[in-house]
Image (cartoon, rainbow, N blue to C red):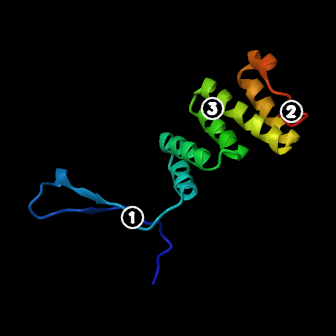
Amino acid sequence: MFSLTPRVPHVIRFANQPQSKQMLRRDTKPTNLRTQLSKALQTGRANQALELYELIEKQRPDEPRWSHRKGDLLQRMGRKADAVLAYERAVELYVAKGFAARAAATTKVMLAIAPDRRGELPRTDRPSH
C-alpha cells in the first residue's frame, strides 16, 4: 500500500533524551536534485533552491535553462547583480546552442534589471566561438 501524501522527516524521540535532543530521520530513498528543487521552490525555501540550482548547473554546465531559472530566482530574492550574471551565462549558452530567440528574450530581461550593461552584452544573432 502506498500513500499519495509527500514523505516528510519523522521525529525520533528516545526515552532517555529530553525533547531538545530529538533527531530527524532523513528519507532513505534517493531523491534527484530536480525533485528537491521543486519542493524547495514550492515551500518558499529560496536559499536551498539556489544551492540546488548551483548543483544542477555543475552537473549540466551546457544547459542554459538552469542559469536562466537561477537568474529568475536571484531576481525575486532581490539579488539583481547576481541575477544579471546568471542571465549572462544563460544568454551565452543559448547562443552557443543556436537558440537566438531565447537569448534575445533573456537579454531583454537582463537589460530591464541593468540597462547600463547594454554595451557589454554578447551578440544573440550568431553562435559564439
Residue 39: x and y, percent?
52, 55
Provide the secondary structure element on which disc 2 rests: loop
Q: CA distance from mark 2 to mark 3?
A: 22 Å
Q: CA distance from mark 3 to mark 1?
A: 32 Å
Q: CA distance from mark 2 to mark 1?
A: 44 Å
Quadrant of residue 93 within the rendered picture: top right
Sequence order check: which comes first, mark 3 or mark 1? 1
Residue 27: x and y, percent?
39, 64
Compared with 4, 46 (above or below) is above
- The amino acid type found where label 2 is placed reads Thr
In the orientation shown, which residue stands out farthest toward the front?
129
Residue at 49% from the left image edge and 62% from the top image edge = 31
Provide the secondary structure element on which disc 3 rests: helix
Residue 37: x and y, percent?
55, 51
Closer to the camera: disc 3 or disc 1? 1
Q: Which mark is residue 67?
A: none
The residue that mark 2 highlights is 124
Compared with 15, 68 (above or below) is above
The residue that mark 1 highlights is 27
Residue 92: x and y, percent?
76, 35
Q: Which mark is residue 75?
A: 3
Closer to the camera: disc 2 or disc 1? 2
Residue at 72% from the left image edge and 43% from the top image edge = 64
